[in-house]
Amino acid sequence: MFGTYSSDEFVGRNQKDLADLLIELAKHERLKQIRLSSIEPQLFNDKLLSVIGSIGKICPHFHIPLQTGSDYMLKLHKRKYTSQHFLKLVNKLREVKPHCALGFDVIVGLPEESNAYFQETYDLLKSIDFTYLHIFNYSKRQGTLAASMKNQIHGSIAKERNKKLHGLLLTKKEDYINRLIDERIILVVVPENYDEETYLWSSTTDRYIKGYYKFEVRNSEFGLKDKKTLKLMPIKKHYDGVYCEVLTSPL
C-alpha cells in the first residue's frame, strides 16, 4: 500500500487518506490480512499509527525505506526525516504492534558517503532490533541530483559496505526468530504451499518469517481459494524460518 494514498472518490466526496482506506478494507470479511509496505517514515502520522494499532487484520510487519542512517546524508539526498525521527517511529510501531517485524531499505555507496557516514548507518541499524534489510548498492543514473554530486563512491567500497550490512542482518534475523520462539509469539498464516515430500505446509507469517507446519488438509489449493487463516506456535528454527504447531482450526 502507498502512504500517499488519497482519493476524492473512495468514500463519499471528502478526501480520504491511507488510514481511512485501511478502516474500509478491514470491514471486508473475506480479506483476512492487510500488509503495509514501503511507506516512508514521515508519512506515519498519529492517525495512521492509531488505525494500525486498532485493526487486528493489519500484519505486525512493516517495510520502511530508511536509505541511510546518517543525518548529513539524509539531508544531502533530500530525505524528509532524520535518524531520530526514524528511531521514534520504530518505537511507536512497537507500541501499537508488539513484536512486529521490521524491514528496511538501505542504499550503500551513495555519493559523498564517507566511512564515517556509513558507520553512522551501521551503528543506527545495530541499535534497532530489525528483522531484515533490503540492501542496494548505489547505481548512478544520469539526470538525477545524486549523479551530479562530487565524491562518487567506488563500486568495490559499496560492495564491502553491503557485505558488512548483510552480516548484521543475518544476526538480527536470527535474533528475531529466537525471540519468537522463546517468547512463544503466536503467528498467523494463510496456507500457501504444500510439500508432498515433507508433508509440510509453508507460508509467510503475519510477522514475515516463513512458517512450516503440518496440517490435515493436503491440497495445494486450500487457503489460496478459501482464504482460511491458522494460528501457529513457533517451536524451533527450520530452514529459513520456524517449525510451528497449529493451534486452531481454520478461521
Image: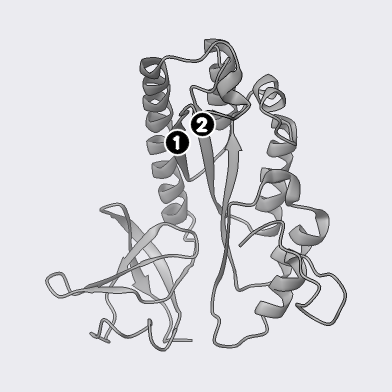
Circle 1 residue: 135
Spatial CA distance of label 2 from label 1 is 6 Å
Q: Is disc 2 placed on a helix, strand or loop?
A: strand
The residue at the point 72 percent across, 72 percent down is 21
From the viewer's side, name the closer residue of 103 and 96. Answer: 103
Q: Is residue 247 left or right of residue 38?
A: left
> Is 118 placed above or below 26 here?
above
Residue projecting furthest to the right? 14
Q: Is disc 1 placed on a helix, strand or loop?
A: strand
> Is 45 placed above or below 170 here?
below
> Is 82 placed above or below 52 here?
above
Q: Name the colouring of the figure.
A: one colour
Q: Earlier in the sequence, mark 2 or mark 1?
A: 2
Quarter of image, res 117: top right
Q: Quadrant of the N terminus?
A: bottom right
Quarter of image, res 164: top left
Mark 2 vs 1: CB contact within 8 A: yes
The residue at the point 41 percent across, 57 percent down is 209
Locate residue 221, reporting x and y percent. Answer: 30, 84
Locate residue 127, reporting x and y percent. Answer: 58, 31
Disc ID at residue 232: none
Disc 1 packing (10 Å; few <14; some 14–19; many ≥20):
some
Q: How many marks?
A: 2
Disc 2 packing (10 Å; few <14; some 14–19; many ≥20):
many
> Is 1 placed above or below 81 here?
below
**Amino acid type of disc 1?**
Ile
Circle 2 residue: 107
Q: Is residue 170 left or right of residue 1?
A: left
